[in-house]
């Protein structure tokens, strides 16, 4: 890399469209790579912009820059309260620049600006503020009395973090990687998904503007090769990944070979258990939304298996169908749009393949998804709701990542619990009931990392993550911060106490 350019206002990045340089260590630099990543809107097919396609040399430069910053202590030696203040300032700047950020994310991944603002920006700034609070209150040092006397236990940053994120909620995912890494005092190199790299540059600049010092953060847009280079780099101390279970397994294997720390937030096939006392009128919209229509079904936490009691099966299904029909597909900027496109034509074909598989295996499509007329330039598909689904069917076992909901009937609550737990995944879930305490008792029996009663959300102050094939480790809250730290014990001389 040769020429270096000073930081510039974040708003300039949106207007530019095509970004010829890489954001390395908080500065704009020329890439080693001569290739580009072209970004196209999944809603219209129109070209949105481009960024350099980082190669192994670019990744190496970013990691070495991060390592130098970490070893210098410029960030890790900054008091936790000051690091927390920077995170809070970053959250404020994201809110101040909301229009630019949400419009860019919408153009890249197809959700409406309103959905980006509520599902990604609100959640993203929430986790930044949550990590700021955790860093402020965290016991960075404590003294323990043990067998040999007093020991000082300290927590310190793990080092250089390599972060790899998915395309479905890129604004939120970037904040959920930057937040704990920066709160802990780490340096971070982030590889955004190749489908949505533009917003990562805009957000990284925002963190620098908030006060993150030079060298600490870098963005390396790229595909599999860039991700592998980041995972394999000897100067990366921890990998944090959000994406598919298949990719997570490969990353975990590579980290295992080098004893590199890793945390994985992977796929899901979660269950929404509807109890027989549910207030259907009050809850039906949120049930259908969280089951399969949130982000056009492109959500790892979607509760795509809806478990309903036989006694109210037909009533619940009818309400679900009418509610799903009310979701309006359209351009993200069009008034009234509530259902955006899928990310690529390949993903749409995959979803349509699962719909065909469901029919082939004997499920009934009481609402049959189609490609809506008048939106031929985008990758749209309307919702599908299946009944007659058994838990051994492909559509009940595998993550579809599209607006497809499987309704599974049950006889008793114990049956519903058994069906919910009969999955390779364990990321999310929900219980729908008029009796909250009854819902909590059912939730305690579900082997999954997060659940909601009569709704679903990810709480910034509470741990988020999965059981089984849904991942390793937890994000958010004190638990999320803890995973970016090393613990050190300093044993004092026998008989010594800090009070003596």
Image: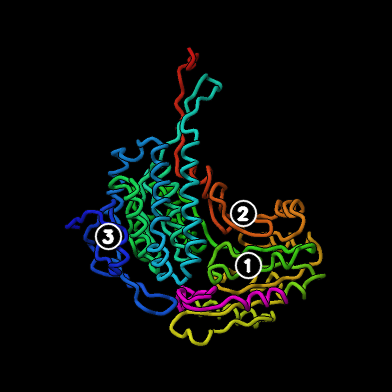
- Which residue is the site of mark 2? 450
Q: Is residue 477 above or below residue 59?
A: above
- Which residue is the site of mark 3? 22
Tell me the CA gap for discs 2 and 3. 37 Å
Tell me the magenta residue range: 318-347
Farthest bottom residue?
373
Label 2: few (<14), some (14–19) or many (≥20) C-alpha neighbours in 10 Å: many
- In the rendered image, which quarter is residue 393 located in? bottom right
Q: Is residue 198 above or below residue 144?
A: below
Mark sitting earlier along the chain (1/2): 1
Q: How is the image coloured?
A: rainbow
- In the rendered image, which quarter is residue 202 located in? bottom left
Mark sitting earlier along the chain (2/3): 3
The tag on residue 276 is none
Farthest left residue?
2
Tell me the CA gap for discs 1 and 2. 14 Å
Q: Give the secondary structure at mark 1.
A: helix
Label 1: few (<14), some (14–19) or many (≥20) C-alpha neighbours in 10 Å: many
Residue 361 horizontal/vertical position (percent): 67, 80
Farthest top residue?
500
Asked whether 481 falls inside the magenta stretch, the response is no
The secondary structure making up most of the magenta span is loop
Q: Does residue 12 appear to the left or right of 412 in the view shown?
A: left
């Amino acid at each position: 890399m040769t020429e270096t350019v000073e930081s510039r206002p974040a708003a300039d990045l949106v207007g530019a469209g095509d970004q010829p340089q890489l954001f390395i260590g908080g500065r704009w630099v020329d890439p080693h790579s001569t290739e580009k990543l072209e970004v196209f809107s999944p809603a219209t097919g129109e070209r949105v912009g481009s960024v350099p396609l980082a190669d192994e040399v670019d990744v190496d430069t970013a990691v070495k820059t991060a390592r130098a910053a970490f070893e210098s202590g410029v960030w890790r030696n900054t008091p936790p309260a000051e690091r927390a203040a920077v995170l809070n300032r970053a959250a404020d700047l994201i809110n101040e620049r909301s229009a630019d950020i949400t419009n860019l994310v919408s153009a890249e991944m197809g959700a409406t600006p309103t959905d980006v603002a509520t599902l990604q920006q609100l959640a993203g700034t929430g986790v930044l503020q949550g990590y700021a609070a955790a860093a402020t209150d965290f016991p960075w040092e404590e003294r323990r009395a043990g067998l040999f006397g007093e020991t000082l236990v300290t927590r310190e940053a793990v080092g250089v973090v390599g972060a790899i994120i998915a395309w479905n909620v890129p604004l939120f995912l970037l904040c959920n990687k930057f937040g704990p890494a920066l709160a802990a005092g780490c340096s971070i190199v982030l590889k955004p998904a190749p489908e949505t790299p533009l917003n990562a540059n805009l957000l990284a600049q925002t963190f620098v503007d908030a006060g993150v010092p030079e060298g600490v953060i870098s963005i390396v847009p790229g595909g599999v090769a860039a991700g592998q280079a980041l995972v394999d780099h000897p100067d990366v101390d921890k990998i944090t990944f959000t994406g598919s279970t298949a990719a997570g397994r490969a990353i975990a294997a590579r980290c295992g070979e080098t004893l590199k720390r890793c945390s994985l937030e992977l796929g899901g096939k979660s269950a929404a258990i509807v109890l027989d006392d549910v207030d259907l009128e009050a809850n039906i919209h949120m049930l259908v939304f969280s089951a399969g229509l949130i982000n056009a079904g492109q959500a790892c936490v979607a509760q795509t298996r809806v478990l309903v009691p036989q006694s109210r099966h037909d009533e619940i299904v009818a309400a679900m169908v009418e509610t799903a029909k009310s979701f309006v597909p359209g351009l993200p900027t069009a008034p009234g749009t509530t259902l955006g496109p899928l990310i690529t034509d390949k993903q749409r074909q995959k979803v349509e393949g699962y719909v065909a598989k469901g029919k082939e295996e004997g499920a009934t499509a009481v609402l049959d998804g189609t490609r809506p007329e008048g939106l031929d330039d985008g990758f749209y598909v309307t919702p599908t709701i299946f009944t007659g689904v058994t838990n051994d069917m492909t559509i009940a076992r595998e993550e579809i990542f599209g607006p497809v909901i499987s309704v599974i009937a049950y006889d008793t609550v114990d049956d519903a619990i058994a069906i919910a737990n009969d999955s390779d995944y364990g990321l999310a879930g929900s219980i729908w009931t008029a009796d909250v305490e009854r819902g909590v008792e059912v939730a305690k029996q579900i082997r999954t990392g997060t659940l909601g009663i009569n709704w679903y959300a990810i709480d910034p102050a509470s741990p988020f993550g999965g059981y089984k094939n849904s991942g390793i480790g937890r994000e958010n809250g004190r638990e999320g911060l803890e995973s970016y730290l090393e613990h050190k014990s300093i044993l004092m001389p026998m008989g010594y106490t800090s009070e003596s």
